[in-house]
Amino acid sequence: MEEPHSVNSPRTILSFSKRGRTTTASVSFVDPNDEKPNSGEHGPKPFEVYGFVGSITIVVATSPNIPSYAMVIIVLAVIFYIGLNFMSTPPPTSLTTMFDEFSREPSSFLSHMERDEQPIEPISDLGIDKINVLMFDDVK
């Protein structure tokens, strides 16, 4: 019997063997990262498959969810805006809800003039007690 002859190249190993009358040739590709060259295993490695399936799953899973993400963001923005307004508003028991630096009491310096000579009163704020009297005293 003859020993098989092989031709080495950086990419392939080509083997020739003669047994009797038949001549067979086999070509195998050697990967330097393989632990078992020529083991007969073909196909992709498991981590390649997991990466491909994972990327496809992420694309499919996120594309129907974009409208629901937008709805949730809008609802949370409205809730956040309302919460900020509640935080910046003084409590109802605070006097700043009735008086501030622009509040003006009605002037009483025009009371000594006659009714025909009185000009229009300057703009002023009405107190809550006067508003209550004007609105609810006639109910009785």
Image (tube, grey):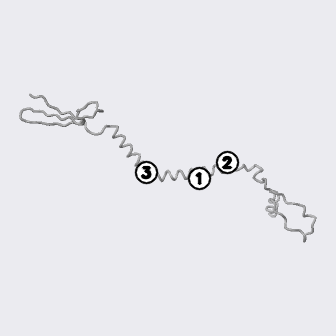
| Quarter occupied by residue 31 | top left
Q: Provide the secondary structure element on which disc 3 rests.
A: loop
Counting from the top left corner in percent of width and height, residue 16 is at: 14, 34
Mark 1 is surrounded, within 10 Å at the Cα level, by few (under 14), some (14 to 19) or many (20 or more) other residues, namely few
Circle 2 residue: 87
Counting from the top left corner in percent of width and height, residue 62 is at: 44, 48
Q: Provide the secondary structure element on which disc 1 rests.
A: helix
Q: Nearer the viewer, residue 30 or 10?
A: 10
Circle 3 residue: 63
Specify which label sits upstream in the sequence, 3 or 1.
3
Specify which label sits upstream in the sequence, 1 or 2.
1
Name which residue lies at 36% across and 43% down: 53
Name which residue lies at 72% across and 49% down: 90
Q: Nearer the viewer, residue 89 or 43?
A: 43
Q: CA distance from mark 1 to mark 2?
A: 14 Å
Which amino acid, by three-letter code, is at mark 1? Val
Q: Nearer the viewer, residue 67 or 8?
A: 8
Q: Is residue 4 above or below residue 104?
A: above
Q: CA distance from mark 3 to mark 1?
A: 24 Å
- Contact check, label 1 and label 2, Cβ < 8 Å: no
Apparent side of residue 74 relative to residue 10 in the rendered image (left or right): right
Circle 1 residue: 78
Q: Provide the secondary structure element on which disc 2 rests.
A: helix
Quadrant showing the N terminus = top left
> As drawn, which residue projects farthest toward the bottom?
116
- Contact check, label 3 and label 1, Cβ < 8 Å: no
